[in-house]
């Protein structure tokens, strides 16, 4: 059985590697609320410049992928900063200027434009942090014991 990743998954892996360098913990395909599934959510360190921030990164692999995305603005209330992640060939002029921009590949990336900060309210931050912890723990449990 082959394990081939799609281009969005490859970008997500590179984003996760990039953000690990900033001491962020990441989860791919995270659901902050019913009907939304983020490509990458990142939980920042308790110390440092981006203290405990929650970032959502949406990976776009093509022009068509971006143009058909109707949900991206629904992610904004669930994070402190919102980013687009694309590869070096993506036509970045399509992307809104008021979001962050990361250029990435499967091995890493670079933050080209920092996303503006929009701090989450404390109750929502606590809820998302708890959801993040539960999702991470459940994924680890499946890795340790894959039985149903």
Image (cartoon, grey):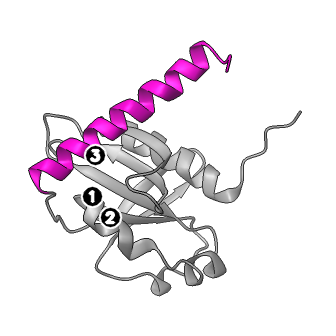
Q: What residue did someone put label 3 on? A: 128
Who's the residue at 62% across and 51% down the image? 9
Mark 2–mark 3 CB contact (< 8 Å): no
The local crowd at label 2, few if under 14, some if 14 to 19, many if 20 or more residues have their Cα within 10 Å, is many
- Which badge, 3 or 1, comes first in the chain's sequence? 1
Element type at mark 2: strand
Which one is in front in this view, the residue at disc 2 or the one at disc 3? 3
**Magenta highlight on residue 31:** no
Q: Quadrant of residue 147?
A: top right
For label 1, the SS is loop
Q: Position of residue 73 (x, y in %)?
A: 37, 75
Mark 1 Cα-neighbour bin, 10 Å: few <14, some 14–19, many ≥20: many
CB under 8 Å between callouts 2 and 1?
Answer: yes
Q: Are marks 3 and 1 in contact (CB under 8 Å)?
A: no
Please tell me which of labels 2 and 3 falls first in the chain: 2
Q: Nearer the viewer, residue 61 or 89?
A: 61
The dot on residue 82 is 2
Q: Which mark is residue 112?
A: none
Q: Which residues are magenta?
A: 121-148
Find numbered disc 3 in the image and state the secondary structure of the residue it sits on: helix
Q: Quadrant of the C terminus?
A: top right
CA–CA distance between discs 2 and 3? 15 Å
Q: Nearer the viewer, residue 78 or 52?
A: 78
Q: Residue at position x 22%, y 36% from top? A: 45
Instruction: Tell me: 50 left or right of 72.
Output: left
Q: CA distance from mark 3 to mark 1?
A: 9 Å
Q: Position of residue 5 (x, y in %)?
A: 72, 47
2 vs 1, front mark? 1
The quadrant of the rendering that contains the N terminus is top right
Which label is found at residue 79? 1
How far apart are the two marked residues, 2 and 1, measured between alpha carbons? 7 Å
Q: Is residue 24 visible?
A: no
């Amino acid at each position: 059985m082959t394990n081939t990743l799609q281009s969005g998954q490859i970008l997500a892996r590179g984003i996760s590697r990039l953000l690990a360098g900033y001491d962020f913990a990441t989860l791919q395909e995270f659901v902050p609320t019913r009907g939304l599934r983020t490509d990458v959510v990142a939980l920042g360190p308790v110390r440092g410049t981006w203290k405990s921030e929650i970032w959502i990164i949406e990976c776009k692999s093509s022009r068509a992928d971006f143009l058909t995305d109707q949900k991206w603005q629904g992610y904004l209330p669930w994070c402190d900063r919102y980013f687009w992640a694309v590869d070096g060939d993506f036509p970045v002029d399509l992307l809104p200027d008021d979001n962050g921009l990361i250029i990435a590949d499967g091995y890493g990336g670079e933050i080209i434009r920092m996303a503006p900060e929009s701090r989450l309210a404390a109750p929502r931050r606590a809820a998302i942090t708890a959801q993040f912890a539960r999702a991470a723990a459940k994924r680890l449990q499946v890795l340790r014991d894959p039985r149903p």
